[in-house]
Image (cartoon, rainbow, N blue to C red):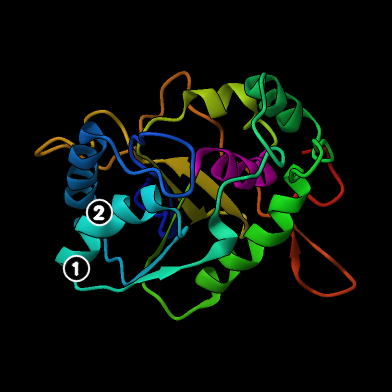
Amino acid sequence: MGDREVARLLLIRHCQSSGQARDAALTEAGVRQAEALADFLSRFPVDRVAASPYRRAQQTIAPFAARAGLPVHADDRLVEQRLAAGPVAHWRDAVRASCGDPEFRLPGGESARDVLDRGWPALEELLRGRHRLPVAVTHGKFLSVMLNSLGPGFGYDAWQSLSNPDVYALVDDAGGGLSYERIWTRRAGLAGGGARVDRGSGNVASGMRPQEDSRTGKQRPGAGRDR
């Protein structure tokens, strides 16, 4: 982040998981990643932790929360996007379709717009709370949907490029809006690794804050444009 940019919230994707089920645990590599993430987060003034209740998300933040002496507040609104009621044979095709069409929904599943409708209220509570720096631990598709609502360039390819874990900061931009920047790199979790953002090629451009709904005065993610 730049010298004048102050993080308002950190969005974190969970560490490497043994599966996609609600109770899937972290792998051995994921457990090591969680310790590295705790080292990384210790550089920030985090004072509030919210996380998906899925086991992999809870295990991802547990080492940091234990070190910081912070409770982990489970929030069902941060769970992963449900693609369908049951297994999806060609699930990557479904993810691609969902990234391109916010209304795309398989039987029994959620559309990207459904995820926005439950996800943004959770993030807004954290942003509006009296916290120095809250974090929200979630999942890859959920994170992608939220970021795409701020800047529609965050689509299928950006989702594929996410790492386990991954960390994005929501920051106030110079125009009074809200933008995002990736602050996790391969170096970030290593001893002595910095939290600087790589501004070179291949980074996702910052997006704008969700537009305001004139009827309610509340911010509407991606209002008036294609997500």
Q: Residue at x 42, y 34 (%)?
A: 19
Q: Which residue is mark 1?
A: 68
Query: 10 Å neighbourhood of mark 1: few (<14), some, or many (≥20)?
Result: some
Q: Position of residue 120 (x, y in %)?
A: 65, 60
Query: Is the magenta region chiefly helix, strand or loop?
Result: helix
Q: Amino acid at mark 2?
A: Leu
Q: Position of residue 131 (x, y in %)?
A: 40, 76
Q: Position of residue 158 (x, y in %)?
A: 56, 26
Q: Where 155 sits versus 72, above or below?
A: above
In the image shown, does 12 or 75 lie closer to the viewer? 75
Name the quarter where the N terminus is drawn. top left
In the image shown, does 208 or 83 lie closer to the viewer? 83
Q: In the shown orientation, is residue 37 left or right of residue 143?
A: left
Q: Position of residue 119 (x, y in %)?
A: 63, 58
* Picture quadrant of residue 152: top right
Among numbered discs 1 and 2, the one appearing first in the sequence: 2
Marks 1 and 2, how far apart in space?
A: 10 Å
Q: Amino acid at mark 1?
A: Ala
Is 145 one of the magenta-colored residues?
yes
Query: 10 Å neighbourhood of mark 2: few (<14), some, or many (≥20)?
Result: many
Q: Which residue is mark 2?
A: 41
Q: Where 214 sits versus 145, above or below?
A: below
Q: Residue furthest right?
A: 215
Q: Of helix, strand and loop, which one carries label 1?
A: helix
**Residue 207 in sight from this viewpoint:** yes
Name the quarter where the C terminus is drawn. top right
Q: Which residues are magenta?
A: 139-151
